[in-house]
Image: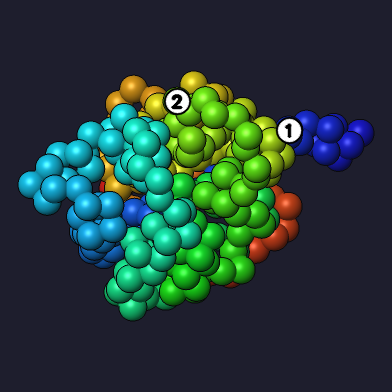
Amino acid sequence: MEGENCYQKVSEPKYDCLLFDVDDTLYPLSSGISAKCTKNIIEYMINKLGIEEDKVPVMCAQLYKEYGTTMAGLKAIGYDLDYDDYHSFVHGRLPYEWLKPDHTLRNLLHSLPIRKVIFSNANEAHVAKVLQRLGLEDCFDDIVCFETLNPKVENDSKELPKTPVVCKPHENAFEQAFKIAEINPHKTLFFDDSIRNLQTAKITGLHTVWVGSSHRTEGVDYSLESIHNMKEAFSELWEAVEKSDVGYSGRPAIETYVRA
């Protein structure tokens, strides 16, 4: 029977999860939030840790490069800082009002009946505030953030680990995220603005999307100048929805250049 054969040929979807970074991914670098965050980190190192001002910018950059985040680096080299105090100083003073509701992205995310998960190095309060400002707080099924990867536990060991903070771009952060959120990396698209994060992600089996760039490089499967260009880049996701009689009711994505 031709009809029966048609149904038998329906293949399993290539992706069953979309994994998203937050900062400079769900909103553009041009928002100014990232620059303000860096300024707050520098002020924290000077005012809270007493590090000489002329040494801070280079030290900040080196720690970020070596450990994934400046905070992870500060902790690793022996600074006794309180995580909550750090996040309050660095993220709690950000001008979140610079972020505006993103109706286009909201409609794109809601139009796809595919699991969507946040994976961020930032703390829970910051992630929640960003999603709230963008109007995306109900668009995701799960959130993996700083507290998820670094739960408060008693540690009697006197040996200082290589990095006391679990964070991207280190493989153990990805492996923990997969277990916590029950993600199959081989069936997941990962969106991030950091090439380092994407290169590690590729090693772990994720399909990688570089957001904020029109170029491809090692570790990158696709590149998007804007997260709004998801539908143009991955039209097969929406085609699968249409074939299953689930209509797309959102506004059309903004046309930007995509290279895959």
Mark 1 vs 2, N-terminal side: 1
- The residue under label 1 is 11
Say what secondary structure mark 2 lies in. loop
Q: Quadrant of residue 22?
A: bottom left
Q: Is residue 90 above or below residue 181?
A: below
Along the viewing direction, whichever of 35 and 80 lies nearer the viewer:
80
Q: Is residue 258 left or right of residue 22?
A: left
Q: Is residue 188 above or below residue 28?
A: above
Q: Quadrant of residue 210?
A: top left
Say what secondary structure mark 1 lies in. loop
Please state the horizontal and vertical placement of residue 134, each as a whole percent of the image: 44, 71
* Residue drawn at x 70%, y 60% as measured from the top left: 246
Q: What crowding class fits label 2: few (fewer than 14 Cα within 10 Å), some (14-19), or many (20 or more)?
A: few
Along the viewing direction, whichever of 91 and 78 lies nearer the viewer:
78
Please state the horizontal and vertical placement of residue 181, each as a whole percent of the image: 68, 44
- The residue under label 2 is 162
Name of the residue lying farthest toward the bottom: 97
Mark 1 residue type: Ser
Along the viewing direction, whichever of 102 and 239 lies nearer the viewer:
102
Q: CA distance from mark 1 to mark 2?
A: 44 Å
* Residue drawn at x 63%, y 34% as measured from the top left: 156
Image disc number at residue 239: none
Q: Can see residue 245?
A: yes
Q: Can see residue 114?
A: no
Q: Is residue 44 left or right of residue 111?
A: left
* Image quarter in which the C terminus is found: top left
